[in-house]
């Protein structure tokens, strides 16, 4: 089976990150759960809007209730993935905003996971859902009974509404989210990746700036990947190809790092620039 066929048949989830963090993830074969108060979205940092059991927004609660609510909400941590879009939308690796925001302005990496393999590492109590993007933040309301002892159960019951809704301006992320309650605040929490990592994508951006550093990064990634392949001990089926996502003058392509096989080209889908039709050539 060709690398292109492997890529196309895999149900994929993507994780954009810096180059150094990608090396650590590959070597450790783990992803760390992130804390809500470290998210880019300010509504993740200040997620709560308060409502009573009837759904009526109110401004004041007893201090013990507020303390219990904040304490419980921030026990939850997440791992964010990018999913392929619906028909006609962008493929997950082809989101320039994600390369810019999370992959060090294109100098980082996009790790590609097999969704079904990844799910084998989900432990009891984890929640996995696609994020919904809303015009308003009404989905952040939390209804409860003013009883601190009941808050943990109520947050659990409303987890989908609290943790899987974002404002519509973030929809370009095409996010799927894995959620876990982590009761010990000082301890970092990780998920083992098993055999889920299937491809590593680097951007060709760096080649135009520093070709020496570009090939050095490919070499470093391949060395880490080869250690994982050896640990898997499953021969050719355990290979993790390193791919390059690059842009030309009028199109984008995804190729193997040696350039021998093209897996995808924007000419076959979207981002097709036709001079005189959807773009102008200025000279």
Image: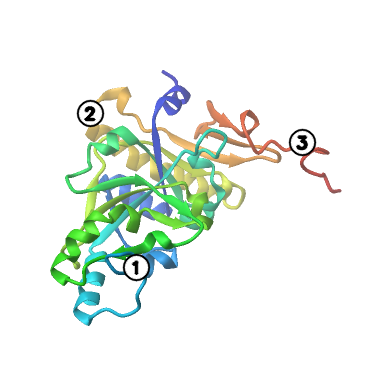
Pick the front one: 101 or 169? 169
Q: Residue at x 22, y 66 (%)?
A: 72
Where residue 267 appears, as percent x and y from the top left, is: 65, 31
160 shown above or below 183: above
78 shown above or below 57: above
Q: From the image, state whether disc 2 or disc 3 is nearer to you.
A: 3
User: Which residue is under mark 2?
Assistant: 233
Based on the displayed image, in which of its 4 quarters is residue 70 positioned? bottom left
- Callout 3: helix, strand or loop? loop
Q: CA distance from mark 3 to mark 1?
A: 44 Å
Rendered image: mark on residue 84: none
Q: CA distance from mark 2 to mark 3?
A: 48 Å
User: Which residue is under mark 1?
Assistant: 37
Q: From the image, state whether disc 3 or disc 1 is nearer to you.
A: 1
**In the shown orientation, is residue 222 left or right of residue 255?**
left
Pick the front one: 23 or 8? 8
**In the shown orientation, is residue 138 left or right of residue 197?**
right
- Callout 1: helix, strand or loop? helix
């Amino acid at each position: 089976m060709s690398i292109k066929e492997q890529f196309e048949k895999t149900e994929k989830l993507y994780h954009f990150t810096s180059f150094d963090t990608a090396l650590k993830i590959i070597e450790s074969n783990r992803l760390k759960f992130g804390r809500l108060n470290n998210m880019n979205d300010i509504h993740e940092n200040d997620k709560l809007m308060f409502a009573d059991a009837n759904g009526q927004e109110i401004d004041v609660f007893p201090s013990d209730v507020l303390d219990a609510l904040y304490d419980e909400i921030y026990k939850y941590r997440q791992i964010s993935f990018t999913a392929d879009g619906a028909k006609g939308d962008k493929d997950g690796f082809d989101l320039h905003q994600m390369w810019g925001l999370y992959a060090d302005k294109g100098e980082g990496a996009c790790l590609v996971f097999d969704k079904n393999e990844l799910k084998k590492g989900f432990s009891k109590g984890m929640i996995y859902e696609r994020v919904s993007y809303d015009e308003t933040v009404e989905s952040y309301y939390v209804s409860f009974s003013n009883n601190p002892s009941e808050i943990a159960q109520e947050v659990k019951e409303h987890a989908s509404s609290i943790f899987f809704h974002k404002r519509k301006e973030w929809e370009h992320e095409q996010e799927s989210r894995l959620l876990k309650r982590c009761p010990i605040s000082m301890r970092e929490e990780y998920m083992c990746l098993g055999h889920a990592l299937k491809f590593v994508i680097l951007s060709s951006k760096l080649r135009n700036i520093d070709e020496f550093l570009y090939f050095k990064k490919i070499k470093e990634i391949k060395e880490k990947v080869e250690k994982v392949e050896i640990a898997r001990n499953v021969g050719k089926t355990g290979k993790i190809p390193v791919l390059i996502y690059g842009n030309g003058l009028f199109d984008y392509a995804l190729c193997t790092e040696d350039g021998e096989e093209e897996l995808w080209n924007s000419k076959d889908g979207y981002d097709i620039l036709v001079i005189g039709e959807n773009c102008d050539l200025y000279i």
